[in-house]
Structure formats: structure tokens, C-alpha cells
Image: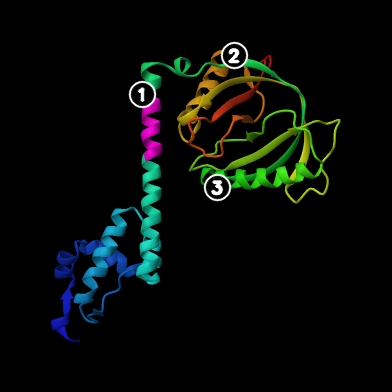
Amino acid sequence: MDRRNMLPIGQFSQASGLSVTALRHYDASGVLVPAFVDPVSGYRYFRRDQVRTAQSIRALRQLDIPVDEVRRLLDGGEEDLATALQAHLRAAERRLEVQRSVVHGLLSRLTEGAEMTHRVIVRKGAAERILVCGATLDNSGLDAFLRGAYQEMYEVAGRGPLTFTGPAFVRFHGVCDDENETLVEACLPFWEEGAQPTDLPDGMTVRDLPESTLACTEVEGAAAAFPQIFGAYDAVADWITEHGFAFAGPTRMVYRRWTGAPDHPDNRLEIAWPIDEPADD
């Protein structure tokens, strides 16, 4: 062993900015293995050129990247690492935007109340026959799924051709955000007495929805984009709770006016939640 090219673990810790405890942990996990371990004392020695690797590990861990992911990134080379860092930065910026929106929403509720921001009305929902395409996913895959689902459904509808009886809408069977998956259904209502769809691809079905009573509110522009739109869901849920109704099915997001761009100022969406009178005890 050429000791001139080696640093004992204490000096290596100072040079790299990683504690001795962390270096032992990274050794055990295979992220940063010392160049030499004294067989008698068990003392670890690192090559001087490992300092930069250790500094990179420290930086990656400061970004809250898991140890296993750090090991994979370092094994993949500089190009893979650069790509992963760019993706991490985009994700971090998105999380910051979500957090900023959540804080502003909470401040608005504290100072104004949800009822001041979202007017909730009750309307009747007619019985409908709908073309449905569903998938279980979280918010990260929502936009791509809806774009693909509606493109496929409009192709099927065009072969009929089907007569649409209302705007497209989405049914959410649970919470769909960055941390939760749920069943999401893209829906197209069409005239049940007219042409009917044929040769449906896998995952696409026809379903009949019964007449319903819906608690609704509309949002436009930035308020219709994620995550600001959660304020509309909260407002409707609060109204249903406060007025003593029961939640009677998946909530709907209705495309009242849609440009195709999620953050476009001309977008107008309706949040519509089926409700029922509460059951008697």
C-alpha cells in the first residue's frame, strides 16, 4: 500500500465533509468502499482521488436522495448523474410550487373562508350513458393518462359517430395527488338512443349512470390547475359536510371549457360531487 496516496478515515472525513460514522455506513452499504482496511486494527484508508466521490455523495444526500439511489447514480457515470440531477431539480421545483399553493390556500381559508372563494350550488345530474376508460394512478401520471384516454375515446366515438350529450368529465374514486393512487375514469356522455360504440379496445367500456344530485362549484384559469384546484374540492366537501348531506359517489371534474393546456387562463372546470340525504340512524 502506497501510504502517500492514502488518507486515514479521520483526515478523509475532514476533506470530504462526511462524518466518520457516515463513512462507515457508506462502506457497509457499498456506496463508498475504502481502498484499504488494516487487517489487524480494522482502520480504514481511502485514496485521495476518492475525496471528490465522497463530496458528491455528501451533496446527493443533502438532496435527500436515498442511499441505494446514490449508489446507482454513481455507478451510472456522469451523464446519467447529470440527467438524474436535472429531473430531481424539476421535481423539487414542482414540490415547492405545490407547497406554495397549499400555504396560500390555507391562508385564504383562514382570512376569508372557503365559502368566500368558491360558490357552491346544487344541480340535478341527468341519467347518462357514458364511454369510460379507467386506470389506477397518482397525479404524476394523470395528465398523460387523460390525454391518451380521451384521444382513444374520441377515435372510437368518431366511428359511430356518437352524439355527445354533454361535456367530458373525469370521475375520481379517491384522492389523486403526488402521494396517493386511486381509480380515475375518463368519461364521455353520449346519446343512448343514437349510434353505439363498437369494437371497444381493452380497458374501455360503456356504462349507464343514474340520475343524481350534485353539489358543484366552478373554477377558472389558475384556480383550475393543480394543486390550486384542491381548494375547490375542499370547498364542496365542506359545504356537503356543513349542510348535512351524504357523499354519494366519486367526485367529478367536468370540462366546461378546456383549451388543452392545464394552466391556460381560459380553462373552466366544474367540481361536482354526488350527494344524498343522510341515512337515518
* Colouring rule applied to residues: rainbow
The numbered mark, 1 or 2, whose residue comes first in the sequence reads 1
Q: Nearer the viewer, mark 2 or mark 3?
A: 3
Res. 251 image quadrant: top right
Res. 73 image quadrant: bottom left
Membership of 189 in magenta stretch: no
What kind of element bears circle 2? loop
Apparent side of residue 182 relative to residue 108 in the rendered image (left or right): right
What's under tag 2, amino acid-wise?
Gly
Q: Position of residue 120 (x, y in %)?
A: 55, 16
Write down the region rendered in magenta: 97-107
What kind of element bears circle 1? helix
For the C terminus, give its image quadrant.
Answer: top right
What's under tag 1, amino acid-wise?
Leu
Q: Residue at x 80, y 30 (%)?
A: 191
Q: Residue at x 16, y 75 (%)?
A: 7
208 vs 221, nearest the viewer: 221
Q: Residue at x 52, y 25 (%)?
A: 219
Instruction: Determine which of the numbered discs, if any, sits on residue 107 in the image.
Output: 1
Q: Which residue is mark 2?
A: 244
The numbered mark, 2 or 3, whose residue comes first in the sequence reads 3
Apparent side of residue 226 relative to residue 97 in the rendered image (left or right): right
Membership of 99 in magenta stretch: yes
Q: Nearer the viewer, mark 1 or mark 2?
A: 1
Q: Which residue is mark 3?
A: 141
The numbered mark, 1 or 3, whose residue comes first in the sequence reads 1
Q: Are marks 1 and 3 in contact (CB under 8 Å)?
A: no
Q: Position of residue 95 (x, y in %)?
A: 39, 43
